[in-house]
C-alpha cells in the first residue's frame, strides 16, 4: 500500500495513478510492494529529520528510511516540496517532473541502487529517466 501525507499545504495530483506507477517500477526492478508512506513537507521539517536521524546539518530534497524486508519494499519517504521547487528551477524542468524524479529516486534506493560514486550516480539517473518515461498519467 502506498500512502501520501502532507505536513504543509501541498497536495499530490493523480494519487492513484502515481501509486500504480511506483508499484510498476518496484515490480520491474524485481521487488514487491509492501507499505510505503510519502510525507511532503517544508525545508524546516526535513532539515530537523536530517539533523536528528542522519546527523547532516544541511537542506535536502528527500530522506528515505528503507525498512524493506527481503524483496518486499517498505519505506518512509520524506520530500521537501520547497527543495523540489528550487531544484526544478535550477535544472530547468517542471515541478511535476522534478517531484516524480525525487519520488522514484527514493524507491530506487530501496531497490538497491546507490548514488555515491560517479558510476552509481549515472546508473541512478538512467533508472530515474527510464521510470519517468514509463509514466502514463502525464
Image (spheres, grey):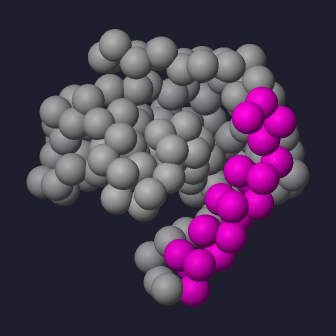
Residue furthest toward the left? 57
Drawn side of residue 50 relative to residue 38, left or right? left
Residue 21: image location, x then y, percent? 78, 35
What's drawn in magenta, residue-wise? Answer: 119-138
Residue 127: image location, x then y, percent? 70, 64
Residue 83: image location, x then y, percent? 31, 44
Q: Is residue 59 above or below residue 43?
A: below
Image quarter hosting the C terminus: top right
Drawn side of residue 131 relative to residue 106, left or right? right
Say which quarter of the image contains residue 75: top right
- The residue lying at 29 percent from left, 36 percent from top is 82
- The residue lying at 44 percent from left, 76 percent from top is 116
Which residue is nearer to you in this view: 2 or 40? Answer: 40
Residue 32 in view in this figure: no
- The residue lying at 23 percent from left, 46 percent from top is 50
Say which quarter of the image contains residue 69: top right
- The residue lying at 40 percent from left, 18 percent from top is 10
Drawn side of residue 70 relative to residue 88, left or right? right
Which residue is nearer to you in this view: 69 or 61? Answer: 61
Q: Is residue 75 above or below residue 4?
A: below
Amino acid at each position: 500500500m502506498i500512502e501520501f501525507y502532507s505536513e504543509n499545504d501541498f497536495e499530490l495530483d493523480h494519487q492513484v495513478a502515481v501509486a500504480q506507477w511506483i508499484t510498476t517500477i518496484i515490480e520491474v526492478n524485481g521487488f514487491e510492494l509492501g507499505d510505503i508512506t510519502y510525507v511532503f513537507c517544508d525545508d524546516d521539517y526535513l532539515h530537523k529529520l536530517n539533523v536528528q536521524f542522519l546527523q547532516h546539518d544541511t537542506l535536502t530534497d528527500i530522506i528515505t528510511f528503507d525498512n524493506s524486508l527481503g524483496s518486499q519494499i517498505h519505506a518512509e519517504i520524506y520530500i521537501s516540496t520547497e527543495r523540489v521547487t528550487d531544484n526544478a528551477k535550477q535544472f530547468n524542468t517542471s515541478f511535476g517532473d522534478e517531484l516524480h524524479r525525487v519520488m522514484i529516486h527514493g524507491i530506487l534506493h530501496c531497490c538497491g541502487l546507490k548514488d555515491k560514486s560517479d558510476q552509481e550516480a549515472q546508473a541512478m539517473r538512467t533508472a530515474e529517466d527510464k521510470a519517468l518515461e514509463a509514466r502514463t498519467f502525464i
